[in-house]
Amino acid sequence: MSTWEETLSQAGCRITESRRAVMTVLAQAERPLVPQELLALGLKLQATLSLVTVYRSLELFEELSLVRRVHQDTKCQGYLLTAAGHRHVLICEKCGRAVEFPGQDDLAALIARVEERTGYQVKTHWLQLRGVCAECQ
C-alpha cells in the first residue's frame, strides 16, 4: 500500500479507482496540472472518471495534505503532490516545471517576527517562487 493510500485509509476514506487515477497522474506530473488536464490524462487510466470526481478528489487530497494548490498567472489553480511538511515550491516560468525545496529553518525567524508584529499565530504557510530553471536559461 502506498503512502497516499495509507493516509486515505487512516482517514477512513475509500481507495477508489478514480482516486487512484488522479494520484497516478499527479505522481507522473513535473508541473502543476489544472483539473481539466487531470481529467484528460486520468481518463486514459479510468474511463468513467468525471470532472466532478477530479475536483472532489483534489479537495480531499488537499485536506489530507497530499496535494497543494499552485497559483498560476494564466490558468486556474494547478495541483502538485506535496512532500510531507513542505510548503515551498519553485516554478519555472518557461517550461512550468515545479520543484519543492526545504526552507522551514530559514523562515522560522521571519514567521516569529510577523507573529510578534501582527499578533497573529501562524498555523501554516505557503511559499511559491517563480523564475527560470537551469535547463531553460
Image: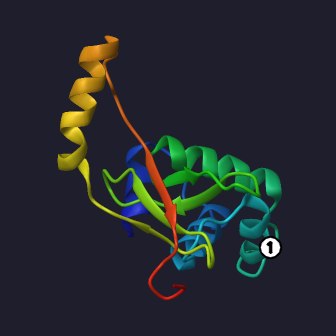
Q: Position of residue 14 (x, y in %)?
A: 55, 52
Up/down of 132 relative to 8, above or below: below
Residue sitting at x 60%, y 70% = 93
Q: Quadrant of the N terminus?
A: bottom left
Residue 125, x across and y down, in percent: 39, 38
In the visual, does 16 lie left or right of 50? left
Please name whichever residue, 17 or 127, is drawn nearer the observer in this view of the structure.
Answer: 127
Which image quadrant is residue 118 in? top left
Looking at this view, is 16 or 94 the one in front?
Answer: 94
The residue positioned 68% from the left and 64% from the top of the image is 18
Task: Determine the residue positioned at 47% across, 57% down.
Answer: 129
From the top left corner, tell me how far across and down residue 24 is, in percent: 57, 74
Residue 35 relative to residue 112: left or right: right
Q: Position of residue 19 (x, y in %)?
A: 62, 61
**What is the secondary structure assignment of the residue under circle 1?**
helix
Towards the viewer: 48 or 114: 114
Q: Tell me which amino acid carries mark 1.
A: Ala
Q: Residue furthest front?
A: 137
**Which residue in the structure is indicated by mark 1?**
40
Instruction: Name the residue nearer the viewer: 117 or 66.
Output: 117
- Residue name at image x 69 percent, y 47 percent: 56
Rendered position, 14 above or below 97: above
